[in-house]
Amino acid sequence: MSGYFGTQADKISDFLVALVELLIDMPEYLAIKNGVTKFLINGSKAEYYNKLSFLLASHEWKEMGYQGNPLAYKLPLYNKITFDNIRDAFQKMVKTKTMLLVLS
């Protein structure tokens, strides 16, 4: 996971404390579910911005076993995501990982 932030120099320590707290304990806001669902759907739709990228992706889809655009398979799954799914994914893929914070 990578990210970017911009702040004044005297606020960096406050930001780092807040960031580490978020990475250790995900807030339990049910609105997170809607944000994650929208992110997945919009990101999937915007992934192919020209014909060449779509052509290359369609070749990859065939290699992965899809008969067409996997978005048709993914959209129904994205709409079924629950907050428990998000919490479980956070526990497996974020909370248990070692953190390395690099400032530049």
Image (cartoon, rainbow, N blue to C red):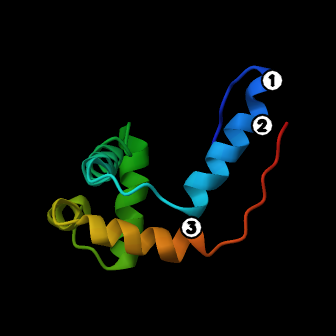
The residue shown at (14%, 64%) is: 76
The residue shown at (53%, 62%) is: 25
Q: Position of residue 46 (x, y in %)?
A: 34, 41
Return the mark for residue 13.
2
The residue shown at (65%, 72%) is: 97
Quadrant where the image shows the C terminus = top right
Q: Most extreme residue toward the top, as rendered?
A: 8
Label 1 secondary element: helix
Task: Answer left or right for 48 relative to 77.
Answer: right
**Would residue 61 be visible to someone looking at this image?**
yes
Q: Position of residue 63 (x, y in %)?
A: 40, 76
Task: Answer left or right for 53 relative to 19.
Answer: left
Q: Which residue is mark 3?
A: 94
Q: Which residue is mark 1?
A: 10
- Mark 1–mark 3 CB contact (< 8 Å): no
What residue type is disc 1 on?
Answer: Asp
What residue type is disc 2 on?
Answer: Ser
- Relative to 56, is 103 above or below? above
